[in-house]
Amino acid sequence: MADTYHHGNLRQALIDAGIKIINESGEENLSLRKVAAACNVSHAAPYAHFKDKEELINAIKNNVTERFMEELETAVNGKISADEAIIAMGKTYVTFFSNNPDYYVFLFGKQNITAHLQMNKEYKNDYPPFLLLRRMYLKHLEESGQEKTFEEQEIELIKIWSIVHGMASIACMKGIKSSIDWNNLDERLLV
Amino acid sequence: MADTYHHGNLRQALIDAGIKIINESGEENLSLRKVAAACNVSHAAPYAHFKDKEELINAIKNNVTERFMEELETAVNGKISADEAIIAMGKTYVTFFSNNPDYYVFLFGKQNITAHLQMNKEYKNDYPPFLLLRRMYLKHLEESGQEKTFEEQEIELIKIWSIVHGMASIACMKGIKSSIDWNNLDERLLV
DNA sequence: AATCAATGTTGACAGTGTCAAGATTGGAGC
DNA sequence: GCTCCAATCTTGACACTGTCAACATTGATT
């Protein structure tokens, strides 16, 4: 038990402990009771901060997504053209999950992203990485002087994202990461 | 309890019951005890046929993969050129998982495909859909008179597969299925 | 007919998510 | 300072899970 009855910032401590457990032994090893124990707190204490096990997991997802977004934004910053920025995003996307396959499975594994967004209360508008991609894509259209309907834009966006997402998915698999680099990514992203 | 002490073909019955449960209420609702109960059999009976819960799940995966392969092969059969066949495969791939999002999450959700292959004892060589794609791709190279090293082939193959896999992944998400058709799939698959 | 390996049952164990009831606390208002 | 309340945490319980060991039943082989 902790020195004080009240922990201070148990909510964030639970999230951090959860991430640590996932990194060390995978999501299947994450239990509310272990997370609580890691924070020196009784097994039902998390229920003061999270309605569910699911709600804790979503909080962790948001936390990981924030770290991901930081990398994406540094990759995009400094790039002059939108085309460069999109390619850089794609590479960062793939690299990030290559380096953290646990995160990939954790984020996209059990439930699809749409479901994740629905659960997500803090990010009520959209999935942040996707928003960033849309911004860059609109810039790309502008720079290349193309005109597209909203519908066309959305479809093209989803396709670009599908490709990057699929590549990341594959890149996470064992053995592939080392033997492949996505150097002609641009040929496929911007047709 | 069943009429007879010995069930007859409990192994397959367990697999079928497992698939039914997954379709009706998702994988998170699948437990050994429920599967056993669905077969009118005691809670420990599955252990005569599967070492683990994981081993039952892998058996179910193989079963679903077989059904998937049947659709892929009918899609490919009858196509004259390899290019047509590859596009048809891609569309079937996306359509199959659009129609069965539960299967997608189940097959590719928790563990990546490589891990799935390692667990898989019956299909010791490779993942069948990937083998089919490789056959078609080699035919494509032949037909278009291209020469590539083995290394180049493998990389290109993985990239094609990444794209299709990513598209299927996206297509599984709610709302997207209806508003998008991958009609210019060919522009991306065979660069 | 006897025997054995395969198959199925029963009972137990530790671990899980969840809830209800109560204990402890910091802080707002007096 | 004191009271009181809402937030936080503990304790104890419940049903459910995967897994194992010990035992029961069976079909097939010898």
Image (tube, coloured by chain):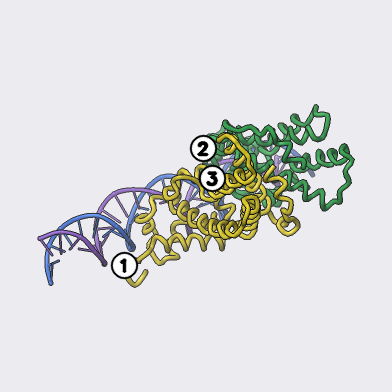
Chain colours: A yellow, B green, C purple, D blue
Residue B41, quarter of picture:
top right
Q: Which residue position is annotated with label 1?
A: A5
Q: At 32% across and 66% down in the image, what residue appears?
A: A6
Q: Are marks 2 and 3 in contact (CB under 8 Å)?
A: no
Q: Amino acid at mark 1?
A: Tyr
Residue A114 relative to residue B54: left or right: left
Residue reaching furthest to the top: B78
Residue A153, quarter of picture:
top right
Eyeballing the image, is C30 above or below B173? Answer: below
State the residue in front, A108 or A123: A123
| Cα gap from disc 2 to disc 1, whole angstroms | 41 Å
Q: Which residue position is annotated with label 3?
A: A113
Eyeballing the image, is B9 above or below A185? Answer: above
Q: Which residue position is annotated with label 2?
A: B25
Residue A178, quarter of picture:
bottom right
Q: At 85% across and 51% down in the image, what residue appears?
A: B150
Viewer can see residue A13 = yes
Percent across and percent down for residue B173 are 56, 39
